[in-house]
Image (spheres, helix red, strand yellow):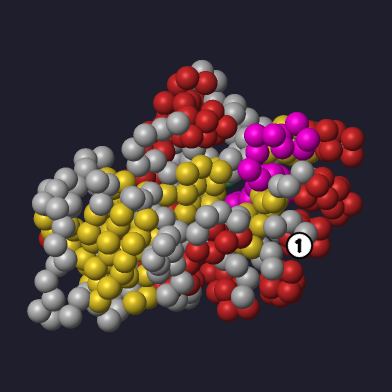
């Protein structure tokens, strides 16, 4: 058992689209055993009557969310409630994180990289997931991030001060961390259109951080905005720039040369711009936000064109960015920036998996069956990603509502 037949009109294999279908995917024992083109008149191969046969418009690898904070509910817009939540018990936070995880699954996300929480909810959840049954995403977690003492990031990062504490703290994080998250700068000052405060670490300190992380086998990703911090991050050899607002063409060039990845997280800043009814920004601040976003759209397009590995991460959990749907919004923004649909889909599938040395999950014979089925092709319209019909991980499949596709024949493309 654990077999599944999927008939799809077209599919994305993790790098490129295939549209000479329909295709029949045979899933056996958690892997893709066969992919064949169905010619007119071909019958569906005989299988036992209990094998679910699913017809759908499109299949592609499960999505990767490269930057979110699982312990935070981005859909909570009441600032007082958000502040109070930071004093909740770990058990309460774990409940929120579990429901955020379910929202990720429902959106078709099968691999998540958390971006830090000081309470260690992410690490706890990772342990839970290691023993979970059913279809759940795989989770990478840094545990706690690091920041300079007294600087931005108290909700996600431990404080370090000098070289000795930098090394000691990274060593203490390494046993449970998949990657090292660094807070290299402050956040954006929307009213003044700049980064708040000076950089947290200078070049020598950042080099020490990278060196220490590498010695312990950890890749590095840095919260970083503004040219000063971005230059330090790239020069020091940080593996991935998170956010990267106020990017400049010269820095993009350096990133391309060094292979530095970029997770541009449009979603939280876009929310500030698009919802003045909630954020309360006046026209002058909205103009600043507009300029910040325009520069981001332009420089992300340039980065992609130059070969910088652009990776999709929504910063879900941030104000106005719900888990799951936030990533799909982010993919729409990447498309709006001018990336091709195949580049956008790669940014949320094969590119992060390759960068993180995670197991590949391409639609290819012999690969783990780790895919999603959609009711329409995102090649026609990227927002088709909002219509996930089935999520399959290691051969086990669920619908977004958590029910299993147990019928012998289920037509996914007609909205069932
Ligand atoms: Zn973040």
Residue to which mark 1 is pinned: 234
Residue 48 location (% of width, % of height): 14, 53
- Which range is magenta? 170-192
Residue sitting at x 27%, y 47%:
2
Which is nearer the eye, 396 or 59? 396
Q: Is residue 374 visible?
A: no
Badge 1: residue crowd in 10 Å (few <14, some 14–19, many ≥20): many
Left or right, 253 with reference to 33: right
Left or right, 291 with reference to 334: right
Residue sitting at x 66%, y 57%:
240
Residue 87, quarter of the rendered image: top right
Residue 193 location (% of width, % of height): 64, 57
Residue 147 location (% of width, % of height): 74, 39
Q: Is residue 136 visible?
A: yes
Residue sitting at x 37%, y 75%:
17
Q: Quadrant of ligand 1?
A: top right
């Amino acid at each position: 058992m654990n077999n599944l037949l999927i008939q799809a009109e077209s599919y994305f294999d993790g790098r490129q689209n295939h549209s000479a279908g329909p295709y029949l995917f045979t899933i056996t024992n958690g892997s893709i055993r066969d992919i064949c083109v169905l010619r007119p008149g071909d019958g569906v191969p005989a299988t036992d009557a209990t094998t679910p046969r699913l017809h759908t418009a499109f299949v592609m690898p499960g999505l990767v969310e490269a930057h979110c904070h699982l312990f935070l509910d981005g859909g909570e817009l009441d600032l007082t409630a958000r502040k109070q939540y930071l004093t909740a018990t770990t058990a309460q936070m774990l409940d929120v994180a579990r429901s955020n995880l379910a929202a990720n699954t429902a959106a078709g996300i099968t691999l998540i990289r958390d971006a830090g929480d000081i309470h260690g909810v992410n690490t706890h959840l990772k342990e839970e997931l290691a023993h979970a049954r059913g279809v759940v995403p795989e989770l990478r977690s840094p545990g706690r991030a690091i920041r300079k003492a007294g600087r931005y990031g108290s909700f996600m990062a431990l404080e370090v001060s000098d070289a000795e504490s930098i090394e000691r703290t990274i060593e203490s994080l390494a046993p449970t961390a998949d990657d090292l998250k660094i807070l290299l700068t402050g956040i954006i000052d929307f009213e003044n259109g700049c980064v708040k405060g000076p950089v947290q670490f200078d070049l020598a300190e950042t080099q020490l951080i990278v060196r220490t992380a590498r010695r312990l086998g950890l890749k590095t990703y840095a919260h970083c905005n503004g040219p000063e911090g971005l230059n330090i991050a790239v020069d020091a050899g940080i593996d991935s720039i998170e956010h990267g607002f106020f990017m400049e063409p010269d820095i993009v060039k350096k990133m391309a040369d060094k292979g530095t990845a970029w997770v541009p997280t449009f979603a939280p800043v876009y929310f500030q711009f698009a919802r003045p009814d909630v954020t309360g920004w006046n026209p002058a601040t909205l103009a600043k936000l507009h300029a910040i976003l325009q520069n981001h759209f332009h420089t992300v397009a340039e980065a992609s064109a130059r070969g910088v590995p652009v990776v999709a991460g929504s910063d879900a959990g941030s104000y106005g960015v719900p888990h799951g749907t936030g990533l799909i919004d982010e993919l729409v923004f990447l498309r709006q920036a001018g990336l091709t649909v195949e580049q956008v889909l790669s940014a949320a599938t094969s590119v992060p998996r390759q960068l993180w040395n995670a197991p590949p999950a391409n639609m290819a014979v012999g690969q783990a069956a780790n895919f999603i089925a959609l009711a329409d092709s995102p090649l026609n319209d990227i927002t088709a990603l909002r219509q996930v019909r089935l999520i399959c991980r290691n051969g086990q499949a669920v619908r977004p509502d958590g029910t299993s596709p147990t019928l012998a024949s289920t037509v996914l493309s007609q909205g069932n």
